Image (cartoon, rainbow, N blue to C red):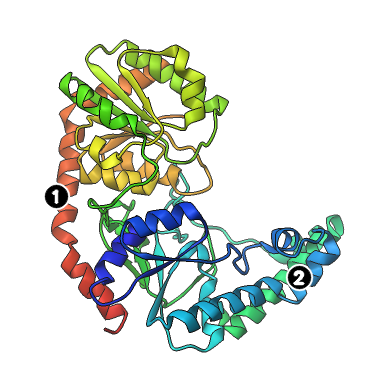
Amino acid sequence: MPAMYLADLLKCHYSIYFAITNDILKELVEKNGFKAIFQSRWRVMLGMERDYIVTEKKQYGNFWNLVKAIRKNEVFEHRQKELKGLIESLKPHAVIIDIFSSTDYLVLKSLGFRLKLLFFNPMLSTYRVSGYPLVSEGTWIKSEVKTEDKSKKHFLNFLRRPKGSILHYLVTRQTKNNLKKGDVSEADFDKENSFTKMFKRVPELVTAPLELEVSPNVRQENQYYLGLSTRNHRIETELDNSFIKVWGNILSIKHKIVYCSFGTFYSGPDRALLNFLHNLFEAIKEMDSTQLVISVNRYVIEAVKNDSISNVHLFTKVPQLEVLKSADVFITHGGLGSIKEAIEYKVPMLVYPLDPHYDQNGNGLKVELHGIGLRGSFMYERKRDMKDKIIELSDNPVYRENIAAFNQKISEKYDLDSNRKLLFQLLDL
């Protein structure tokens, strides 16, 4: 959705194509008025060689085949051929690259086409800045980043794991070769990014407000923050047909509404999720004037259908913006898209991070830091604590006042016209 926000800024001057990897994304892109083209999922310098050997080449992913693939740079050659075909077919003026496909920057530069290249970041800043937490960290321990002598460590690793050390050497050499192919100096290869391979001096569009960071000091010189970048006119797919039939009845009851969604993180009836929902149901059962609306996968609905409670309503997928318009509390896993939409509709949040490796922990930290919500422990939260937090967020006006003030502040700073002007400047229009 934030990528489509960028597309909205550009569509008056450009034909927009989304390079996608599956039919679900194709449907989403096309229903929202843009064109979709298929691409493979292979990216260079991200350790995909073994999977590429097994899936694409139908070979064993053993050590020697892996050595061969890395030495011959097979994934780079595959991606180079693929992108060359796309560029020759579409003849684009610019390519905006998701940071999780950031090494496409090297591949595109190696092809020699005259293209304007920008990065797009759907999270908050992913760089390591001394004294501030990483985007994945849920605690803020103010300390300097320490360096270590890696030469001794590499020697010991070679003695313990010679094959791993050989592969490490080959990957290091491969990285240098790829930088050379892309005409990028090692000094411009940013090693302080904690999530992916990034490059200095390339414009990076961050589809979030700088004010949501722990401090404006984390901003890099090449980063441009665009505010909430929400898309209120979006068309959603795969919605639960039963929602429309029930939603009017829920609103007519005139109770407080707690909305709970963990996005697409869980695709089955995971035990941890079932335990969490059991505690949430028990908490809501004791709150007579509250209705709970949950968006969860169909396997979970099947697993909990016997625990039916009158003020709990389960759906496979709901139109989130429609629900947030009337919600009093939003229980979320802390995905940045959901957090921004909660800010847009001024709904206090209760964040239960699920994935410790990406941005959910850090997003939860920032929600609490800015006084626009609270956090909890997904695995260990007790029913009583859950109930107390929901009541605190719904009854204490300070959270809604904080989020309303936060919304107003960023609404005054970021708008479509200024973001479009910035984007046109970066693209040399």
| Label 2 sits on residue | 69
Q: Residue at x 49, y 26 (%)?
A: 300
Q: Position of residue 334 (x, y in %)?
A: 39, 41
Q: Quadrant of the C terminus?
A: bottom left
* Residue 25 quadrant: bottom left
278, 36: nearer the viewer: 36
Comparing 90 with 195, the one in front is 90
The answer to whether residue 184 shows anywhere in this view is no
Crowd around label 2: few <14 · some 14–19 · many ≥20 (10 Å): some
**Badge 1 is on which residue?**
408
Image x and y of residue 179, in percent: 59, 80
On-image quarter of the N terminus? bottom left
Residue type at the position of mark 2? Ala
Residue drawn at the location 25% of the way across and 11% of the way down = 288
* Residue in front for this viewpoint, 207 or 94: 94
State left or right for residue 356 relative to residue 406.
right
Q: Secondary structure at mark 2?
A: helix
